[in-house]
Amino acid sequence: MKLVETPYLLEEKEKNVSKVFQFDGHNVLNIQLRTNEEIKEHDANAHVLIVVRKGKVIFTVEGVEQVVTTGNMLHMDPLEKHALKAMEDSDIVVIKISN
């Protein structure tokens, strides 16, 4: 068992992207964005699961916009191009699951 801290850092600085841990080729990231901050379009060579712990984020996946909040999760297939923009201060967990 391992308890991993993900401190809320937006009070100290702007956009924060940090690797939380890695195991068996899988990666877990924590992204913290202030309102209107963005991450430009990119893709990942893995399945990606997005969990919004706080806030509201617009993901644009292959040109289709989807709002992700604390009440849902988003799954993306490998190599799907995506970008995101925070609609309000947001704290996101990104789980990249390699094949």
Image (spheres, rainbow, N blue to C red):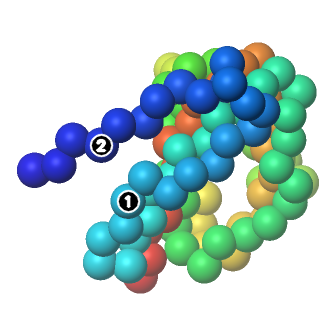
Q: Position of residue 48 (x, y in %)?
A: 54, 60
Amino acid carrying label 1: it is Phe
Q: Quadrant of residue 27?
A: bottom left
Secondary structure at badge 2 equals loop
Instruction: Classify 10 Å Cα crowding around label 2: few (below 14), some (14-19), many (20 and above).
Output: few
Q: Are marks 2 and 1 in contact (CB under 8 Å)?
A: yes
For marks 2 and 1 on the same chain, the one whose residue lies earlier in the sequence = 2
Q: Where is residue 11 drawn, in percent x and y?
A: 67, 18
**Which amino acid type is shown beneath numbered disc 2?**
Val
**Residue at image coords 67%, 41%:** 16
Q: CA distance from mark 2 to mark 1?
A: 8 Å
Question: Which residue is found at the position 85% from the left and 34% from the top?
Answer: 37
Residue 60's spot in the image, x, y percent? 82, 47
Q: Is residue 72 above or below residue 44?
A: above
**Residue at point 82%, 21% (across, down):** 35
Q: Secondary structure at mark 1?
A: strand
Residue 4 is labelled as 2
Q: Examine the rendering and report whether any part of residue 56 can be seen.
A: no
Query: Residue sitting at 35 percent across and 37 percent down?
Result: 5
Is residue 63 rendered to the left or right of residue 6?
A: right
Q: State the image coordinates of residue 36 (x, y, percent, origin top left).
A: 88, 27
Question: Tag on residue 76?
Answer: none
The mark total stands at: 2
